Image: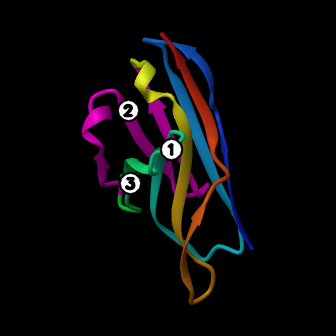
Amino acid sequence: QVQLVESGGGLVQAGGSLRLSCAASGSIFSVNGMSWYRQVPGKQRRLVAAVTNGGSTNYADSVKGRFTISRDNAKNTVYLQMNSLKFEDTAVYYCNAYINTGGVWKIYWGQGTQVTVSS
């Protein structure tokens, strides 16, 4: 059994910062890519940022220069530092991870954390 638990969401004023965390736990042999997605009501879930286990990153154009994804492989944890937040960053943020639980690779999702940016 694998769980991804997110934390760090909340309400912040435009221009402010938040840091999201997502920790994977359970019967984990190894973790490959880890990512953050976000979703607003009525819209598809969209990729925000991703990081490989080697540290390579990619970002959605809308967050480049403002958000930074990082990970701690020893803790199976991924972070998303969000700076210069805008109203349009308001969404539920989900982490996911590609995890091997003993010969089986599978994508796991967190439960989501709400980020609300007030204008």
- Which x, y percent locates residue 42? 50, 44
The residue at 50%/28% (across/down) is 90
Q: Is residue 35 above or below residue 2?
A: above
Which residue in the structure is indicated by mark 2? 67
Label located before the other in sequence (1 or 2): 1
Range covered by the magenta-colored residues: 55-83
Question: Where's residue 82, x and y in %?
Answer: 45, 28
Q: Which residue is mark 3?
A: 51
Distance of label 2 from label 3 (alpha carbons): 13 Å
**How busy is the neighbourhood of tag 3: few (under 14 within 10 Å), some, or many (20 plus)?**
many
The quarter of the displayed image where residue 66 is located: top left
From the viewer's side, name the closer residue of 40 and 61: 40
Element under disc 2: strand
In the rendered view, does 83 fall on the left or right side of 9? left
Q: Name the mark nearer the viewer: 1 or 2.
A: 1
- Foreground residue, 53 or 2? 2
Tag 1: Cα neighbours inside 10 Å, few (<14), some, or many (≥20)? few
- Quadrant in which the N terminus appears: bottom right
Q: Which residue is mark 1?
A: 42
Task: Give residue 112's position: percent from left, percent from top.
Answer: 63, 46
Answer with left or right where residue 111 lies relative to residue 96: right
Q: What amino acid does circle 2 point to?
A: Phe
Label 1: element kind: loop
Classed neighbour count for the residue bearing mark 2: other residues with Cα under 10 Å, few (<14), some (14–19), many (≥20): many
Q: Is residue 16 magenta?
A: no
Extreme left residue here? 61
Type of amino acid at the residue the image marks with label 3: Val
